[in-house]
Amino acid sequence: MSIPQNSQILNSDHYSQYHQDGFIVVRQLFTTDEIHHLGETARHDQAMDLASSTMDDGQGNEVRLALWNHPGDGIYGMFARCRRVVDSVEFLMGGEVYHYHSKMILKDAKTGGAWAWHQDYGYWYQNGVLFPDLCSVMIAVDPATRENGCLQVLRGSHRMGRINHILSGDQAGADIERVQEASKRLEHLYIDMAPGDALFFHANLLHCSDANHSDQARWALICCYNSAANDPYKDSHHPRYTPLAKVEDEDVLRVGTSGALRSRVEFANLVTEDKSARSLTQE
Ligand SMILES: O=C(O)CCC(=O)C(=O)O
């Protein structure tokens, strides 16, 4: 595949690195002001708090997140729809994408649970998505460090293809034998992030995170995109192809400061009847 023209943010080095490693980190994709508005909105968002789902991570801590399928007109939507993010994802994926869902990972101080090693496509595969042509953008709301359970990745693991995912307790994780063997050959990295940094990662990249034993929360917004050409062949709890209306980068701050429009999404109910079969990481 030939490397597309540079996007506003990314260049051909980013493109090559993403396809080689399965991820790139873009420092300060969002300004301190923009992230401040996002964090303030989320922390005061009672609907988000009420809609959040909590599951046992099997180690006595709670994995908590809130998820929504359509980005909306509020500040969450501005982050998910702005050109800085969407044009960059389209540049990395070589074509049009649509919003698959967004989620806020509410990794609270002391109680925030661990996420088992997994690939996002390990779960999205079940949703009628034929190719692993999806990309997630993790935007740090709080500083993410090794102490408060930052994301960990196995560099280049997206090239292994999809690994079986096995249910263990409330969470399903990638087949641990393969993860252990992969970690002998691939670099295991802790992705430290400052608020406003963004991690773009491939749907088959193996990733996990430790519990947060520190007294610093580690919240992060993760916006997930599917390639328009990869429209799922069946309905699931995430949308099929739905054109994404991009907004200008300035809209993030404009909506962030406007108060009234700030939240505005319909949260999904993750606690389904077949909770044990779906598990949190199947979102
Ligand atoms: O934020 C984290 O610690 C992990 C989130 C994650 O792996 C996911 O949403 O797939």
Image: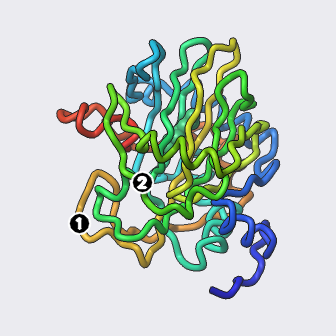
Query: In the shown orientation, is residue 250 left or right of residue 175?
Result: right
Question: Which element carries disc 2, helix, strand or loop?
Answer: loop
Name the residue nearer the viewer: 75 or 49: 49
Q: Quadrant of residue 57?
A: top left
Which residue is identified by label 1? 234
Sort mark 2 into few (<14), some (14-19) or many (20+) by Cα contacts within 10 Å. some
Q: Is residue 66 above or below residue 82?
A: above
Residue at coordinates 37% horizontally, 55% vertically from top-left?
124
Query: In the shown orientation, is residue 116 left or right of residue 219?
Result: left
Outermost residue to the bottom: 2
* Residue 31 image position (x, y, % from top left): 81, 45
* Residue 66 image position (x, y, % from top left): 45, 34
Residue type, numbered disc 1:
Lys
Q: Earlier in the sequence, mark 1 or mark 2?
A: 2
Q: CA distance from mark 1 to mark 2?
A: 22 Å
The N terminus lies in quadrant: bottom right
Please give the label number shown on residue 163: 2
